[in-house]
Image (cartoon, rainbow, N blue to C red):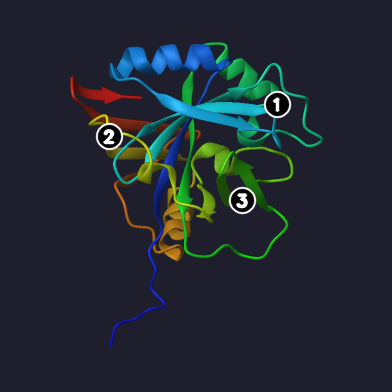
Amino acid sequence: MTDTSYTPAHLDHLVIAARTLEEGVAWLEGRLDVPLQPGGEHSAFGTHNRLLSLGTAYLEVIAINPVAPAPPRPRWFGLDTPQMRERLADGPALIHWVAAVRELPQRPDVLSVSRGENRWRLTVPATGELPGGGVEPSLIVWDTPAPPARLPDAGVRLLTLRLGTPHPDALRGQLNALNFVGEVEVYEAPQPELAAQLETPGGLVTL
């Protein structure tokens, strides 16, 4: 008999943040030598993004939208924090990742979000801070088709997502509890850190 209770989670997308969307797009397109695709605006958080297919997952470049009204709550992905602003002063960076799951727990940090015709539910801490400094995934359920189904394939694929943390066993336990399946490597590090190795038409690139 098949165990239908086992539904693995998987990588939904990588999050690269920048001081401005233009800076982030120029940086990533310069690294990967492929064009990013239009994204849109997130009115609930005052941000906007551009996207790139990774096959079954995708990558987003996100930044504060300077013409959008300030949201009534802290922006997601720690974009309002002094620490993130200082970090991005050195240039765009891979700051976080999101795992797709079948169901989300009923808890206060689960928000319904939309962008254009897209609808999804996502875990966002009330403080806006990155869970686990960015190495613990946010969790998402799509109520409309996920972006990879609609993005053109630029021939870029994720080979490995490396997650460094002072608490590797705890992070591994969290991923095991999600039944996570994917090319994620967890290792011990003095502070949270992320790196993604991508295969591109021009060769290997590490972000």
- Ranked by sequence position, the earlier of labels 1 and 2 is 1
Question: x and y percent of residue 7 in the render?
Answer: 39, 68
**Place of residue 45 in the rendered image (x, y in percent of width and height, measured from the top left):** 69, 34
Q: Residue at x 78, y 26 (%)?
A: 70
Quadrant housing residue 169: bottom left
Is residue 73 visible to the viewer in this orientation of the structure? yes
Q: CA distance from mark 3 to mark 2?
A: 28 Å
Q: Is residue 88 left or right of residue 129?
A: left
Question: Are the two marked residues, 3 and 2, in contact with CB atoms closer than 8 angstroms?
Answer: no
Name the residue at the right extreme: 72
Where residue 37 appears, as percent x and y from the top left, is: 41, 26
| Mark 3 → mark 1, Cα distance in angstroms | 17 Å
Q: Earlier in the sequence, mark 3 or mark 1?
A: 1
Q: Amino acid at mark 1?
A: Asp
**Residue type (three-letter) at the residue carrying disc 2:** Asp
Residue 31 sits above or below residue 3 on the image: above
Q: Which residue is mark 1?
A: 80
- The quarter of the displayed image where residue 76 is located: top right
Picture quarter with the C terminus: top left
Q: At numbered mark 1, what does the secondary structure look like: helix, strand or loop?
A: loop
The residue indicated by pointer 2 is 153
| Label 3: few (<14), some (14–19) or many (≥20) C-alpha neighbours in 10 Å | many
Q: Nearer the viewer, mark 1 or mark 2?
A: 2
